[in-house]
Amino acid sequence: MEYDIKDISLGAEGKRLIEWAARDMPVLSQIRERFAREQPFKGKKIGACLHVTVETANLVIALKAGGAEVVLCASNPLSSQDEAAAGLVGEYGIPVFAISGEDRDTFFKHITAVVAIKPDITMDDGADLVTTIHKDHTGLLQTVLGGTEETTTGVIRLRAMARDGALKMPLVAVNDAKTKNLFDNRYGTGQSTLEAIIRATDMLVAGRTFVIAGYGWCGKGLAMRARGMGANIIVCEVDAIKALEAAMDGFRVLPMAEACEQGDLFCTVTGDINVIRGEHFKKMKDGAFVCNAGHFDVEVSITDLEKLGGKPVRVRDNVDQYTVGGKKIYLLAEGRLVNLAAAEGHPASVMDMSFSTQALACEWLAKQPKRLAPAVYDVPEDIENTVAKLKLASMGIEIDELTAEQKKYLSSWQEGT
């Protein structure tokens, strides 16, 4: 078995951590048990480009239990947990190509290693695997059944490819499922991003002016959690509806050109490029902290920061100090996804829903009677309902059911006032 990880001797520790995460992923555990009985992926190869964490480990273990040949690589150079990678290789026999802190060349070499198995199904978190296949391995586009996409940034890329007529395979937008974005993006990002900031800086959040760029589900979750810790929140937005929503949620809404002068802490969660750039760095307070919780390291312009502040000085793990016009600005996690680079990412209990949705979306692709047309597909509603009901049951929560009379009323138009 070929693989490329930091240290295989970490395998036993990785297995312990994978099992610890599994105890908080009851829905995925049930799906894994069914997969083991039914073997929906027998004879199929699945290539995954995801954050290599202990939660992801439980997902790929479930896929292997379902009969798949699975190979995993990292979707972010700083998000890999080396123990999880070693556990998958040494304890579960699943090839992994991921090393925490790997350079750009190694990152893409690892993606190529996944492509080399000629996957029947792909799994992405950021669309790097799919775009690599479209650019450099077009022959696979004739045989691949389809793939899934886990994150907002990746879905944006795939929809852009579809609009341009460049998309040549069917992809399921797992990120857009309610069982993913309402929980993973909101509660997962909110908690894990704050945890990462606190781990990296030892900062007291209470009383700080916290500027959050982007008020999608990730931004909403981060604003909600930061307010709960006593921060004064400023939201920056380009979408009028989301800006209005932030204002009515009780947050100040300002353009970044104004917010940059007031913030003590900045976090981008937009999926777009150069949200914080040179003109903003020049106006920031002495001692401002800047980080990113979007998928790619493009939201904070590190190029502009280096032009203004020269080479950084590493003052703490995951904290680089730049001097801009005599003022110190601190960049966390090199501008990469801070909640995974400086902490452990989302808690297992919220990833239970995301990865259960992901696993069932792969099964849906594998069971299609014929290959779907190239397009971006929503997760089927019955999959979302299944995941939600299983999660409620695991929490010991019961809900009401409509009576026959109520169903008839909701489906008719004759009755009214």
Image (cartoon, rainbow, N blue to C red):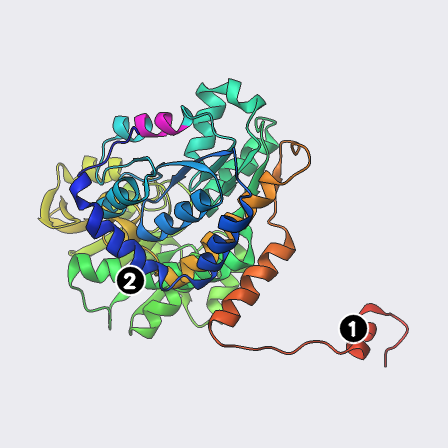
Which amino acid type is marked by label 1?
Lys
User: Looking at the picture, does residue 227 appear above or below residue 325?
Assistant: below
Identify which residue is drawn at 46% across, 73% down.
395
- The residue carrying mark 1 is 407
Marks 2 and 1 sit apart, C-alpha to C-alpha, by 43 Å
Q: Nearer the viewer, residue 16 or 211?
A: 16
Quadrant hosting residue 19: bottom left
User: Looking at the picture, does residue 385 appear above or below residue 206?
Assistant: above
Q: Nearer the viewer, residue 202 or 396?
A: 396
What segment carries the magenta color? 109-114
Which of the image's four quarters has the N terminus?
A: top left
Q: Main secondary structure of the magenta part?
A: helix
Within 10 Å of disc 2 (Cα), the crowding (few <14, some 14-19, many 20+) is: many
- The residue carrying mark 2 is 194
Q: Nearer the viewer, residue 137 or 154?
A: 137
Which of the image's four quarters has the C terminus?
A: bottom right
Within 10 Å of disc 1 (Cα), the crowding (few <14, some 14-19, many 20+) is: few
Residue 141 at x, y percent in the picture: 55, 24
Identify which residue is drawn at 41% across, 69% down.
251
Residue 380 at x, y percent in the picture: 63, 51
Residue 150 at x, y percent in the picture: 46, 46
Which amino acid type is marked by label 2?
Leu
Quadrant hosting residue 10: top left
Q: Tag 1, which secondary structure? A: helix
